[in-house]
Image: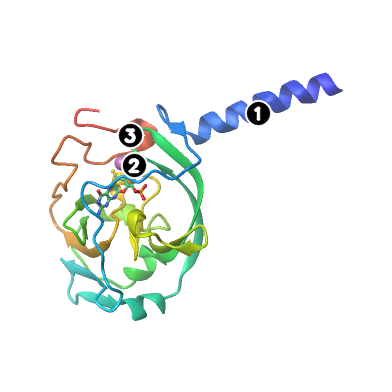
Amino acid sequence: MGFVSRGFRGKRRGEASSTRLPPGQYLVTDWPVLSAGPTPRVALDDWTFSIEGEIDEPRKWTWKEFNALPSEDVTKDIHCVTKWSKFDVEFKGVSLDTLLDGVDTAAEHATQISYGGYTTNLPLDDLMGNKAWIVYEANGEPLAPEHGGPARMVVPHLYFWKSAKWIRTLRLDKDDIPGFWETNGYHNYGDPWREQRYWGD
Ligand SMILES: Nc1nc2c(c(=O)[nH]1)N[C@H]1C(S)=C(S)[C@@H](COP(=O)(O)O)O[C@H]1N2
Ligand SMILES: [Mo]
């Protein structure tokens, strides 16, 4: 039976990796840093995260308040538009379902706004339904400043530029307002499984 299981296992391994790695991506084991500017340093005493825009009552948390929210541990694959993917990053943070729970809004879009000014837009639906987290730990350590610490968005089903590092505000928008990369040639939605890298993809 050795010849059967050997061939079968080999094939299954190949199929598993090709369905887990989006088209055009290659796997890395390190964690590259991609930042369009310098790393902003935010003292935890000064840090806040807020939800603003098309919302009756804006919400705002201090670092202490944010850390007291119910958190989740999630293990996710991440995919950068520059073609590296990394499997099984262990994040800890607060689900956007928790942060948006009970919010009354006419908005269908959202913009993530970072300390430092980076912005990225996405449909509000893509932040809900167990699809997005604001995380403050990765792989058992506090999130490193270069990876977006104290806290960053993680929206793993979209290319990783849709996950703002050093997030400060989530703005709920009626209109779709392209963010930093979206006005500079990157696709407005950014689905790695459909290779939506650039305008026109
Ligand atoms: N504030 C901010 N967030 C950002 C970026 C950035 O330049 N500034 N780069 C984006 C891009 S292109 C990617 S691939 C990921 C990189 O995250 P990492 O440096 O932790 O790998 O962050 C995204 N979020
Ligand atoms: Mo990226």
Disc 2 to disc 3: CB gap under 8 Å: no
Cα gap from disc 2 to disc 3, whole angstroms: 9 Å
- Where does label 1 land, which residue? 12
SS type, badge 1: helix
Q: What is the basis of the colouring in this image?
A: rainbow
Give, as a three-letter code, the residue at label 1: Arg
Q: Which mark is residue 82?
A: 3
Mark closest to the chain's N terminus, 1 or 3: 1
* Of labels 1 and 3, the one closer to you: 3
Badge 2: few (under 14), some or many (20 or more) residues near its Cα, within 10 Å? many
The kind of residue tagged 3 is Thr
Q: Secondary structure at mark 3?
A: loop
Residue 137 place in picture, x, y as percent: 44, 63
Could you tell me if the residues under marks 1 and 3 are in contact, i.e. CB atoms within 8 Å? no
Disc 3 residue: CB within 8 Å of ligand 2: yes
Quadrant for the N terminus in the image: top right
Residue 135 vertical position relative to residue 75 in the rendered view, above or below: below
**Residue density around tag 1, few if under 14, some if 14–19, many if 20 or more, within 10 Å:** few
Residue at (23% x, 32% y) in the render = 198
Q: Which numbered disc covers residue 3? A: none
Q: Which residue is mark 2?
A: 159
Q: Residue 148 falls in which quadrant of the image?
A: bottom left
- Above or below residue 66? Residue 75 is above
Which one is in front, 33 or 100?
A: 33
> Residue at image x 21%, y 40%?
188
Quarter the C terminus occupies: top left
Q: Nearer the viewer, mark 2 or mark 1?
A: 2
Q: Position of residue 175 (x, y in %)?
A: 12, 53
The one nearer the camera, 126 or 148, is 148
